[in-house]
Image: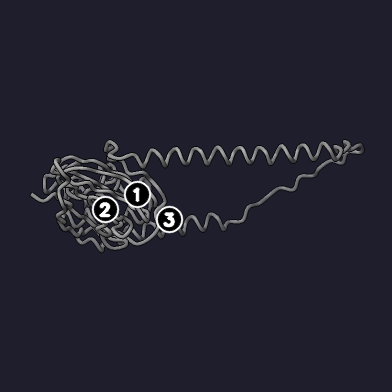
């Protein structure tokens, strides 16, 4: 039986919807649907696909290893097909170029210098334009408490397969004066997807690059990271360490003391 058919049948046996599975596994609904449809190329990378499949299989009580092995075989066969296509020799036709008796005169030295200088000026302007655009995007990401979109930015992911099991720990913190709340600052030192909630409210959900800083305030702030060793946390200005270990999905809850 195929991966998608097995997942769909087990889900329907338990009378669960795709939204129920998404809520239980914290995996986006479109990736749950992609696994059932076996549209694996919709998922950003093989690493994420294996992690999502493992989480789905555990949620349904299935043998995750056999399903992940089958998914790995799919990617291996696809890679071998790509290699075969690249190694296939290309046949090119030899085109005879007619000879022209009177070739045009080459430009003088001054004209060549001006053209070369114009080329380097154009390259410099394009570099400055790209630099400005990248810093504008970085400034948008650093804004504190951005609205939650629930969207995962597709990107090429490298590294370890992220296990589906999550380690959780509630860490009490001192109460901010007069507010009865705590301030939680987050800094990424590596690449990781991040989810921040306060009670039932989702404050943030995004995949972040290293060097991003975020700030949240509330009575209870729950931080969940796909790569626990890539996310550093500060509570009321004091460092409390990393969310978890490198390459492991980790979760920490920071709560104001009564």
Residue at horizontal 20 percent and vertical 58 percent from the top: 166
Place of residue 46 in the rendered image (x, y in percent of width and height, measured from the top left)? 37, 55
**Residue designated by label 3:** 78
Of tags 2 and 3, the one toward the viewer is 2
Measured in 3D between alpha carbons, the distance from the residue under mark 1 to the one under mark 2, in whole angstroms, is 37 Å
Residue in the foreground of this view, choosing between 204 and 101: 204
**Quadrant location of residue 153?**
top left
Residue at horizontal 33 percent and vertical 57 percent from the top: 230
Circle nearer the N terminus (2, 3): 3
Circle nearer the N terminus (1, 3): 1
Place of residue 56 in the rendered image (x, y in percent of width and height, measured from the top left)? 22, 53
Q: Secondary structure at mark 1?
A: helix
Residue 2 appears in the picture as rendered: no
Circle nearer the N terminus (1, 2): 1
CB atoms of marks 1 and 3 within 8 Å: no
Residue at horizontal 79 percent and vertical 40 percent from the top: 113
Residue in the foreground of this view, choosing between 119 and 131: 131
Residue 79 appears in the picture as rendered: yes
Of tags 1 and 3, the one toward the viewer is 1
Q: Is residue 256 above or below residue 247?
A: above
Residue furthest left in the image: 258
**Residue designated by label 1:** 40
Measured in 3D between alpha carbons, the distance from the residue under mark 2 to the one under mark 3, in whole angstroms, is 44 Å
**Residue designated by label 2:** 234
């Amino acid at each position: 039986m195929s991966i998608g058919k097995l997942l769909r049948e087990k889900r329907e046996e338990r009378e669960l919807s795709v939204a129920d599975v998404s809520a239980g596994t914290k995996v986006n609904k479109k990736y749950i649907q992609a696994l059932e449809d076996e549209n694996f190329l919709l998922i950003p990378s093989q690493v994420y696909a294996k992690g999502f499949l493992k989480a789905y299989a555990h949620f349904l009580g299935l043998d995750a290893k056999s399903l992940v092995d089958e998914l790995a075989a799919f990617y291996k066969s696809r890679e071998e097909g790509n290699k075969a296509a690249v190694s296939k020799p290309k046949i090119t036709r030899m085109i005879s170029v007619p000879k022209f008796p009177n070739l045009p005169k080459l430009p003088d030295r001054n004209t060549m210098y001006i053209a070369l200088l114009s080329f380097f000026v154009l390259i410099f302007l394009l570099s400055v334009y790209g630099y400005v655009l990248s810093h504008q995007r970085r400034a948008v990401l650093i804004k504190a408490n951005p609205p939650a979109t629930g969207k995962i930015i597709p990107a090429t992911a490298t590294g370890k397969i992220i296990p589906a099991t999550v380690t959780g720990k509630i860490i009490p913190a001192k109460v901010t004066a007069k507010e009865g709340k705590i301030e939680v600052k987050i800094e990424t030192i590596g690449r990781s997807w991040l989810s921040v909630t306060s009670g039932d409210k989702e404050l943030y959900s995004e995949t972040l690059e290293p060097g991003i800083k975020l700030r949240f305030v509330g009575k209870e702030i729950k931080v969940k990271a796909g790569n626990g060793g890539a996310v550093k946390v500060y509570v009321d200005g004091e460092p409390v360490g990393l969310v978890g270990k490198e390459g492991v999905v980790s979760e920490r809850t920071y709560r104001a003391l009564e």
